[in-house]
Image (spheres, helix red, strand yellow):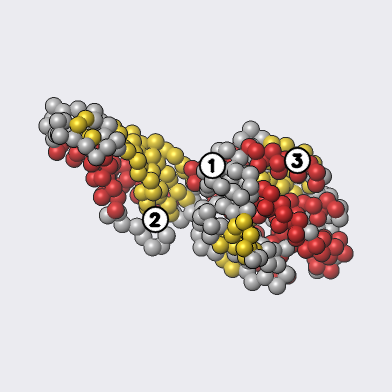
Amino acid sequence: MILNNEKIIKALEYIKSEDDNTTQETLTMCQIPAPSHQEKKKAEYVLEKFKEIGLLNVHMDAVWNVLGTWPGDGDGPVIMLAAHTDTVFPIDTDVTVKKEGSRYYCPGINDDTHAVAEIMAVAKAMVRYDIHAHGDIIFCANVCEEGLGDLKGVKYIFNNDNNIDAFVSVDNPVTGGVVYTATGSHRYKVTFTGNGGHSFADFGLPNPIHAMGRAIAKISDFKAPKLPKTTFNVGVIEGGTSVNTISASASMLMDIRSDSDEELERLTEEFMNAVESAVEEENARWDADKPQVKADIEVKGVRPAGTQDPDCPIVTAAFDAARMLGIEPELRDESSTDANIPISMGIPAITIGRGGNEGGVHTVHEWFEPVESWLGPQRDLILILLLAGFEDVAEPVIKKR
């Protein structure tokens, strides 16, 4: 059994003894602002840490993913253990850490900063005790997981030559949680434009804001199935100059999500038709010789959907790793994570939970409480060794591509 191995026992004990340092690493990194597409400063910090730990081939790629490898001792499968450096918060967000009781408060402290600190803890333990799986382990702090980041980091990795046989992302609020499916999404920015003018003197001009309102009204009547879960949302609207101005432009951000590519495509087509129809109705409402309203639809993000069997080897291994440490594993609701990309390509991939207690994710009141938080990186270590194989106590559960 893997827990009877002397090296593994020492490594697990080391991860627990280093928990305060792992927490401190989290506090340091969460004070480095890192919105999607603006993660370079945090990436540079992680780059130096990977080098200090002793990982090999440490480098930052063209989009600021930071990667480092701990080599295997044979010809086993290559496993990537990842966490993302970006947060949902704008660059000017106050990221000063505040402590109340045993809780630390800071925007982005959990999602996914603590996970980045966790994978560092795993790397430190493997290097310190010279633990080599059968296959290489690639540690990755990737960019652009959140929102309009559109998974740019993992897309770059998997759309270029690689030999990754399985992918594990640490990015879930429940330590024993396992996400094994990929919720797809289509995101668009629609900009309505017109001539604009004075609300009284130029009354009768087609109005971009009114056209957008017509579109939103149509969207609000869309029908979406509960299964496969499918959702739609107009999340941001902008436009207008003053109460007595016919605006020359208005825009909205549209999000469509589904666990089914077919439903994504269906709702996307309905959305396109709604925008076109709204523009036609607004223009038809007024004199034909007036300047017309137009709509430009810009693709802001495409995340593919996908699924795996809930009893597939990578999920089973995650459950086994959790149970070895007394963590109750559970399948989590479908969501959109970095694992979407490999799952959609048929590569085994899951997203698993961070250690410790947490709350307020994606709000400025986000908090982290280091209660038995070492269980996260301990589970991560056991999991990647089960996936890649280790000495004579664990054969790889993942096959090489």
**Residue 321 image label:** none
> Do labels 2 and 3 touch, CB within 8 Å?
no
> Do labels 3 and 1 touch, CB within 8 Å?
no
291 sits left or right of 58 in the view:
left
Query: Closer to us: mark 2 or mark 3?
Result: 3
Circle 1 is placed at which residue position?
92
Q: Amino acid at mark 2?
A: Thr
- The residue at the point 70 percent across, 67 percent down is 372
Helix, strand or loop status at disc 3: helix
The percent coordinates of residue 55 (x first, y second) are 79, 44
- The residue at the point 57 percent across, 66 percent down is 331
- Between 141 and 94, which is closer to the camera in this rendering? 94
Query: Closer to us: mark 1 or mark 2?
Result: 1
**Residue 231 image label:** 2
C-alpha separation, residue under disc 2 versus residue under disc 3: 41 Å
Q: Earlier in the sequence, mark 3 or mark 1?
A: 3
C-alpha separation, residue under disc 1 versus residue under disc 2: 31 Å
Circle 3 is placed at which residue position?
48
Q: Amino acid at mark 3?
A: Glu
Would you place residue 195 above or below residue 324 in this image? above
Would you place residue 296 above or below residue 7 in this image? above
C-alpha separation, residue under disc 3 versus residue under disc 1: 24 Å
Q: Amino acid at mark 1?
A: Asp
